[in-house]
Amino acid sequence: MEIAEEQGLDLVEISPNANPPVCKVMDYKKFLYEQKKREKALKSKATKVTIKEIRFGPNTDDHDYEFKKKHAEKFLRDGAKLKAFVFFKGRSIIFKEQGQILLLRLAQDLEEVGKVEQMPKLEGKRMIMFIAPKKGK
């Protein structure tokens, strides 16, 4: 304690369970500041995954499909995950096969920029498929 007071620093107990307890002389406020700085740097390096959605109908026209495909390609090139889904309204649920064909066609067209993470799956009135961007783009 005397050594710490002489140097104008704090005596910090590192391991209280050891026999004898282990202590260190340091500037505690500076230590906390450095620790926060380190954590902030690690947090900024962590990648944030964004998910973009594209919605189709079971009877989506070719022009609309091409338009949405261009957007999907842009999203994947920007590094975002893509959630493509076909929304079935009312009795259009009878066109399940058309919805699946549409999503598989999209997956095939986006093969060079992304890979399918989850194949088309029907959840309620939606058929959902996830596509992740390929690395190295």
Image (cartoon, helix red, strand yellow):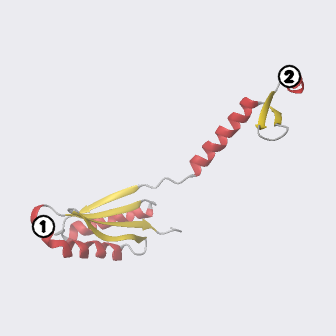
Amino acid at the residue labelled 1: Ser
Q: Nearer the viewer, residue 122 or 53?
A: 122
* Position of the N terminus by quadrant: top right
Label 1 sits on a secondary structure element that is helix
Going by the image, does 4 lie left or right of 90?
A: right
Q: Is residue 122 above or below residue 32?
A: below
Which labelled disc corresponds to residue 5? 2
Amino acid at the residue labelled 2: Glu
Q: Residues within 10 Å of mark 1 (few under 14, many from 20)?
A: some
Residue located 80% across and 41% down the image: 18
Give the image location of residue 11, x and y in percent.
Answer: 81, 29
Give the image location of residue 33, x and y in percent.
Answer: 68, 34
Going by the image, does 124 lie left or right of 111?
A: left
Q: Which residue is mark 1?
A: 92
Q: Distance between the Cα atoms at labels 2 and 1?
A: 79 Å
Labels 2 & 1 near each other (Cβ < 8 A): no
Q: Residues within 10 Å of mark 2 (few under 14, many from 20)?
A: few
